[in-house]
Amino acid sequence: MSKCYQVNVFFQSDCVLENIKAYTMIFGLIGLVEELYFLPEDIVDNSDTSAYIRNNGLDIFLRTKMEYEQLKDQLNKTPSLERLTLKMVDESAFEAFEPVPKNKKLIETQPIIKQITKKPIRCFCQTY
């Protein structure tokens, strides 16, 4: 049975290129999750997101079959990780994101809804 989690990640203060560290972390999770969203959404294309991540952290929302401790252990393997907060959340946490068509495998690296939307943007998602 799938579980929903919210993760907030901070990298070490002497870390540079936090956006690239964030991308590497996200990419490492892709095969372990059914659905994954992150904010800020444009970590690959916008180097200014490094400052945002440094100040606010990287927010990740994911759906996986992994148990809490398994996921926490996996996340703690991230290089340059200073701290993370992991909590289980209700399915309603995903309502802010664009829905994924059922039974469609999708890996998306660009925002898929218009920037004018006030909702967070799905930048990476994989479903099975």
Image (cartoon, rainbow, N blue to C red):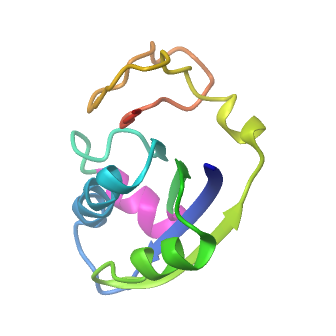
- Near-viewer residue (1 or 53): 1
Q: Which residues are magenta?
A: 48-57
Count of numbered circles on the image: 0
Q: Is residue 116 left or right of residue 28?
A: right
Between 76 and 114, the one lying in front of the other is 76
Q: Is 81 above or below relative to 124? A: below
Q: Residue at left 49%, top 29%?
A: 121
Give how far across and how far down residue 126 sits, in percent.
37, 36
Q: Residue furthest front?
A: 1
**Which quadrant would the C terminus be assigned to in this image?**
top left
Residue 50: image quadrant is bottom left
- Front-most of residues 119 and 28: 28
| Residue found at x 27% / y 82% | 79
Q: Quadrant of residue 45?
A: top left
Q: Image quarter for residue 109?
A: top left
Return the x and y of residue 26 as percentages of the image width and height.
Answer: 33, 55
Q: Is residue 125 left or right of residue 120?
A: left
Q: Does residue 110 sit above or below 3 in this rendering?
A: above
Q: Is residue 55 magenta?
A: yes
Magenta span main SS: helix
Residue, x 62% and y 23% (percent of image)?
A: 118
Spot occupied by residue 71 in the image (x, y as percentages of width and height): 50, 71
Tell me what residue is drawn at x 26 percent, y 54 percent.
27
Q: Is residue 9 above or below residue 128?
A: below
Magenta-drawn stretch contains 17? no
Q: Position of residue 68 (x, y in %)?
A: 61, 72
In the rendered image of this protein, does residue 7 appear above or below residue 11?
above
